[in-house]
């Protein structure tokens, strides 16, 4: 009998999305993301804007 669940990939993706949303929500008003000065900060902000549901609401 296999120990794999039928939603293995989907369940992992849901966990990653939830973790990303929590992290982005916590960093939403951080100066590095509100006023990004370098490529890393701009990429982080763009990631939150693109993938975190709490940022997509705005």
Image (cartoon, helix red, strand yellow):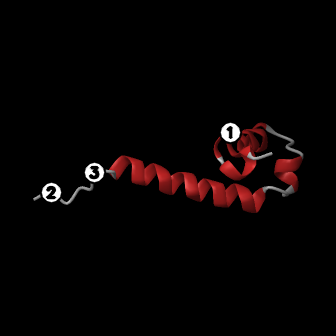
View extreme (front): residue = 57
- Disc 2, disc 1: CB below 8 Å? no
Coordinates of residue 51 in the picture (x, y in percent): 64, 43
Quarter of the figure with the C terminus:
top right
Residue 56 placed where, x, y %?
A: 72, 44
Q: Which residue is mark 2?
A: 2
Secondary structure type for disc 3: loop
The answer to whether 34 appears left or right of 4 in the picture is right
Q: Are marks 3 and 2 in contact (CB under 8 Å)?
A: no
Q: Residues within 10 Å of mark 2 (few under 14, many from 20)?
A: few
Mark 2, secondary structure of its residue? loop
Q: CA distance from mark 1 to mark 3?
A: 28 Å
| Residue matched to label 3 | 6
32 horizontally vs 22: left or right: right
Nearer to the camera, 58 or 9: 58
Dot 1 falls on a residue whose secondary structure is helix
For mark 1, does the 10 Å Cα neighbourhood hold few (<14), some (14 to 19), or many (20 or more) residues? few
**Residue matched to label 1:** 50
Residue 42: percent from left, percent from top = 78, 39
Q: Earlier in the sequence, mark 1 or mark 3?
A: 3
Q: Which tag, 2 or 1, sits closer to the chain's start?
A: 2
Tell me: 4 left or right of 38. Answer: left
Crowd tier of the residue under label 3, counting other residues whose Cα lies within 10 Å: few below 14, some 14–19, many 20 or above: few
Q: Position of residue 44 (x, y in %)?
A: 72, 45
Labels 1, 3: front one? 3
Marks counted in the figure total: 3
* Callouts 1 and 3 close, C-beta under 8 Å: no
Residue under the image location 74 percent in, 62 percent down: 26
Mark 3 or 2: the one toward you: 3
Q: Residue at x 23, y 56 (%)?
A: 4
> Residue 41's quadrant in the figure?
top right
């Amino acid at each position: 009998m296999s120990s794999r669940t039928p939603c293995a990939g989907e369940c992992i993706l849901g966990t990653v999305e939830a973790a990303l949303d929590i992290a982005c929500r916590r960093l939403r008003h951080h100066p590095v993301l509100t006023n990004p000065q370098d490529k890393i900060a701009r990429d982080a902000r763009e990631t939150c804007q693109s993938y975190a549901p709490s940022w997509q609401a705005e």
